[in-house]
Amino acid sequence: MPSVTTFLLPIGAYLLGSIPFGIVLTRLGGAGDLRQIGSGNIGATNVLRTGRKGLAAATLLLDGGKGAAAVLIAQMVQPDMALWAGAAAFIGHLYPVWLKFDGGKGVATMLGISLAAWWPAGVAFAVVWLAMLALTRRSSVGGLSGAVAAPIAAAAGGQPDAVLVMLGMALFVVWKHRGNITRLLDGTEPRVGER
């Protein structure tokens, strides 16, 4: 019979994941409402468009950190729920209740989850993300490539549970980037640093 913790962990993880750090930091930093800037997205790439590199870096770390925290807390409380707690935090970031379920694209949060759940997959994610970002100077290409790399790495490492959850997250990342994919195909996707 499922315990109370089995129900509370994903709920708590979802609420943790739904904290919109990009919006909170830009408001506290006097940069305005992030949803009215650039693409309107709540992630670090859009925070960078405010010209505040420090706020963008902090958003990246906190969005990744909340995903990692959900996994690590679950590992201490109920280890068999760790991956699912991470997935709940990821869904919270994409569809936060506080923002009428209109959230971010999940790249940084998925990276944090991957690092905490099975670190080789997280390292593969980070390396591919940074490599593709450096090659193309397009944040979307880096994020999409890194997200796809994580379940591949988990499969290569014989981690079937991680493959399942990471593949699901990667598909969500692709879905949330569908506008970017259209612009990439049209040749209109901006490079990092372009407004």
Image: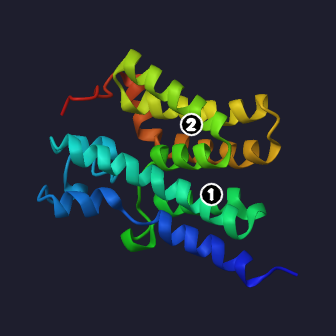
Which of 148/180 is in front? 148
- Amino acid beneath label 1: Ala
Which percent across, then down, holds residue 35? 25, 57
Q: Quadrant of residue 160?
A: top right
Please, is residue 170 above or below residue 145 in the view? below
Quadrant that contains the C terminus: top left
Bin the neighbour count of mark 1 within 10 Å (Cα to Cα): few under 14, some 14-19, many 20 and up.
Answer: many
- Asked if residue 177 is positioned above or below residue 9 in the image, the reply reads above
| Closest to the observer, 13 or 123 | 123
Vertical arrangement, residue 21 with respect to residue 14, above or below? above
Q: Is residue 15 above or below residue 165?
A: below
> Which labelled disc corresponds to residue 87?
1
Q: Amino acid at mark 2?
A: Ala
Helix, strand or loop at label 2? It is: helix
Element assignment for label 1: helix
Question: Residue at horizontal 59%, vertical 37%?
Answer: 122
Q: Extreme bottom residue here?
A: 4
- Image coords of residue 41 (percent x, y): 32, 51
Q: Residue furthest top?
A: 135
